[in-house]
């Protein structure tokens, strides 16, 4: 075909393809328009891509249902414009809460789009301008509803909603009947920031669960949060409420936020936890990168039952402790009435102690039970008196000192306060991350923890892979399995390798690839130094020793050597090459087994259990038993341990009766005795070893088991 005709035919072909592509026929171009396109092709100013773009634009606005039924109709945007269609003002001042709620109610299951009216910021975490103000809780309705902003909130820059700082409910609530809800590209601000350096912002929420001032409360199933920032709420940033407490199950159905999904979420400056997950139906969630920073009680507290997966969580300065105790001044008296303390100072208030909202600590009073930390609720400068809530029986004491509290002492006060859940639990100081443990199975992958926050508590059913948080976990017994340089660290009370079949089980330590190095199973002390070790040499000999300070036990092929004195040959017959010189074995001539040797004897002492009747001053007689059990029916003000022989192991089981809350005073010759648990009908246990004078603790003990 001649070049000229080829150039003329090409635009006709493209136009025909465009018409066939679109189910809504556009008006056909005129021959003049075609020739104009052809002319464009001659001068190279128009390309095939530009022609096809017109057809693709038509395809994007296609309504396939209308086309299939042969009844074309006009199609609007794929979302509801909250300003255009619902009358949202979006000026950051007017109360748009009622309008947004009405819009959500009128459009269940739809994509509601908010507009960014103010200036957007990016980088550095600076808050963006306020776009919307709400004086009430925004409530999602209907399945698959999506509340969104037109610009992404990838650090900052999305639509910012400021909530009334006096709001008692959450910023955004997702009730149980709202399933599959999505919230994205929003910045939510509650107006009650926690600042680690300002004692006035150290405020404990009234309760840990139920209805409260959370940034987002999730009770509906399978919710998704994406590119959301939640900051400065009076309780939790995000509350995954699978315990059916926030909403009455009879009227609203059970709360089931299982299979929740978070992607790129930040929780910042909240006075509870950044994220709090609780209940039997808050499981199987997947969180991909969450930034939890500056939250008062902890970054993440996962108190679910069956566990969730956290990928690359970042925790910064949660439960940070930068405030030291202030300079003190003298106290004239402290009186308590109705759990309200009145503290009268000798001189006028100084150094910030007489400031409403701050925290103070009293020390060295005549009655030490009046010493403690509390938040100042009222001040009378004329009488030099201040008031604070203080749990104590009514009474009076004199003397002592008072000053502003350290942040650590405030956390201690929190940890001694009931969390309001109705389950007799205290508030948990979670640090960067805390896991429930028990039946909960958590997986935390590559977590990041700043060094200026408290230790993490992963729980004893948590698998932690990678990250640096394990270096901060100094409270052994928190549990978990985590990587460390060159291997894994197992942290917990019990490790079970369970056989689900009837086959044999092996625990293998495999040697090197080219040689057999010495292999050790070591038991380390609190400083990481070896205590006892079991080793296998290159030629297969087994040795048990404690690094040379005690006589080792060693196998060398056909015999077992104990300090080079005794051996057992391959036939199992015992001999004593050095003879028997111990007076306690004199006269023993028979080599036959002793059939009546009781199994409960160690070093000639019976390992019997003595059950003591309750006494306010019990005596534990080690001549009669090595294990003692007593049930507390009241306070034990003093106790006595007698008859303990050198090297004797002593076990104490201290239980509470049905009332509980009874204290126990260890004998004066016991060293390292634990604080006995006070839970009703629970027991605490601890083991000691005696040197003939004192009994020293050899275990940290078990509390309230």
Image (cartoon, rainbow, N blue to C red):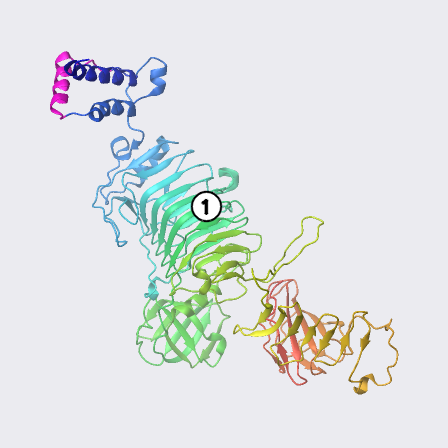
Camera-side residue of 509 and 638: 509
**Stretch in magenta:** 26-45
Q: Main secondary structure of the magenta part?
A: helix
Vertical arrangement, residue 694 with respect to residue 126, above or below? below
Query: Percent from the top left, x then y, of residue 318?
Result: 39, 60
Q: Is residue 152 left or right of residue 172?
A: left
Secondary structure state at the residue bearing disc 1: strand
Q: Is residue 615 visible?
A: no
Q: Is residue 402 visible?
A: yes
Query: Percent from the top left, x then y, of residue 239?
Result: 43, 49
Vertical arrangement, residue 216 with respect to residue 76, above or below? below
Query: Percent from the top left, x then y, of residue 609?
Result: 75, 71
Asked if the magenta segment contains residue 284, the reply would be no
Query: Percent from the top left, x then y, of residue 128?
Result: 25, 49
Camera-side residue of 177 and 264: 264
Q: Which residue is mark 1?
A: 286
Asked if the magenta segment contains residue 36, the reply would be yes
Q: How many marks?
A: 1
Q: Residue at x 45, y 50 (%)?
A: 310
Residue furthest toward the front?
514
Camera-side residue of 461 and 177: 461
- Within 10 angstroms of label 1, few (less than 14), some, or many (20 or more) residues? some
Vertical arrangement, residue 430 with respect to residue 672, above or below? above
Vertical arrangement, residue 473 with respect to residue 97, above or below? below
Quadrant in the picture for the C terminus: bottom right
């Amino acid at each position: 075909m001649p070049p000229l005709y080829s150039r003329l035919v090409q635009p006709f072909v493209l136009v025909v393809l465009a018409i066939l592509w679109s189910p809504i026929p556009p008006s056909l171009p005129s021959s003049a328009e075609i020739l104009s396109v052809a002319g464009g092709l001659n001068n190279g100013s128009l390309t095939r891509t530009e022609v096809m773009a017109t057809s693709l634009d038509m395809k994007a606005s296609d309504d396939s249902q209308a086309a299939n039924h042969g009844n074309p109709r006009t199609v609007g945007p794929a979302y509801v414009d909250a300003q255009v269609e619902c009358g949202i003002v979006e000026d950051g001042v007017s109360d748009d809460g009622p309008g947004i709620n009405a819009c959500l109610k009128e459009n269940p299951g739809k994509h509601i789009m908010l507009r960014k009216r103010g200036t957007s910021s990016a980088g550095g975490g600076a808050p963006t301008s306020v776009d919307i103000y709400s004086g009430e809780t925004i409530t999602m309705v209907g399945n698959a509803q999506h509340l969104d902003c037109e610009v992404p909130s990838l650090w900052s820059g999305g639509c910012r909603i400021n909530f009334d700082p006096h709001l008692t409910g959450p910023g955004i609530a997702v009730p149980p009947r709202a399933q599959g809800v999505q919230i994205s590209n929003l910045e939510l601000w509650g107006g009650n920031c926690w600042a680690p350096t300002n004692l006035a912002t150290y405020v404990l929420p009234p309760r840990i669960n139920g209805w409260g001032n959370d940034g987002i409360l999730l009770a509906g199933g399978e919710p998704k949060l994406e590119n959301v920032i939640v900051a400065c709420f009076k309780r939790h940033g995000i509350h995954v409420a699978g315990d059916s407490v926030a909403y009455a199950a009879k009227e609203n159905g059970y709360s089931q936020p299982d299979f929740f999904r978070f992607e790129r979420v930040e929780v910042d400056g909240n006075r509870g936890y950044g994220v709090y997950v609780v209940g039997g139906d808050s499981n199987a969630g997947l969180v991909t990168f969450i930034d939890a920073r500056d939250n008062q009680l902890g970054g993440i507290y996962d108190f679910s039952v069956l566990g969730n997966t956290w990928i690359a969580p970042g925790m910064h300065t949660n439960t940070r402790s930068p405030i030291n105790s202030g300079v003190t001044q003298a106290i004239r008296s402290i009186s308590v009435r109705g759990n309200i303390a009145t503290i009268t100072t000798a001189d006028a208030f100084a150094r910030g102690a007489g400031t409403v909202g701050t925290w103070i600590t009293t020390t060295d009073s005549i009655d030490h039970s009046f010493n403690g930390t509390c938040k100042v609720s009222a001040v009378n400068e004329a009488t030099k008196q201040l008031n604070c809530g203080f749990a104590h029986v009514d009474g009076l004491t004199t003397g002592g000192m008072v000053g502003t509290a350290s942040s650590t002492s405030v956390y201690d006060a929190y940890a001694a306060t009931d969390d309001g859940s109705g389950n007799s639990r205290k508030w948990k100081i979670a640090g960067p991350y805390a896991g429930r443990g028990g039946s909960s199975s958590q997986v935390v992958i590559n977590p990041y923890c700043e060094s200026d926050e408290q230790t993490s508590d992963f729980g004893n059913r948590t698998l932690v892979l990678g990250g640096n948080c394990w270096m901060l976990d100094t409270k052994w017994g928190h549990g978990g399995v985590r990587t460390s340089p060159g291997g894994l660290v197992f942290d917990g009370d019990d490790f079970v390798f369970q056989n689900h079949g009837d086959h044999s089980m092996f625990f293998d330590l495999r040697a090197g690839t080219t040689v057999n190095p010495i292999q050790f199973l070591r038991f380390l002390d609190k400083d990481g130094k070896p205590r006892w070790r079991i080793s296998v040499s290159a030629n297969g000999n087994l040795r048990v020793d404690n690094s040379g300070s005690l006589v080792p036990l060693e196998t060398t092929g056909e015999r077992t050597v104990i300090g080079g004195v005794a051996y057992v040959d391959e036939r199992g017959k015992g001999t004593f090459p050095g003879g028997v010189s111990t007076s306690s074995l004199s006269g023993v001539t028979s080599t036959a087994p002793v059939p009546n040797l009781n199994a409960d004897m160690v070093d000639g002492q019976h390992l019997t259990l003595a059950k003591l009747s309750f006494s306010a001053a019990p005596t534990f007689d080690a001549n009669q038993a090595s294990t003692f059990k007593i049930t507390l029916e009241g306070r034990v003000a003093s106790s006595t341990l007698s008859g303990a022989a050198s090297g004797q192991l002593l076990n104490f089981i201290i239980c509470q009766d049905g009332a509980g809350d009874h204290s126990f005073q260890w004998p004066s010759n016991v060293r390292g005795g634990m604080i006995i648990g006070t839970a009703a009908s629970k027991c605490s246990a601890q083991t000691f070893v005696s040197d003939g004078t004192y009994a020293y603790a050899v275990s940290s003990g078990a509390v309230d088991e």
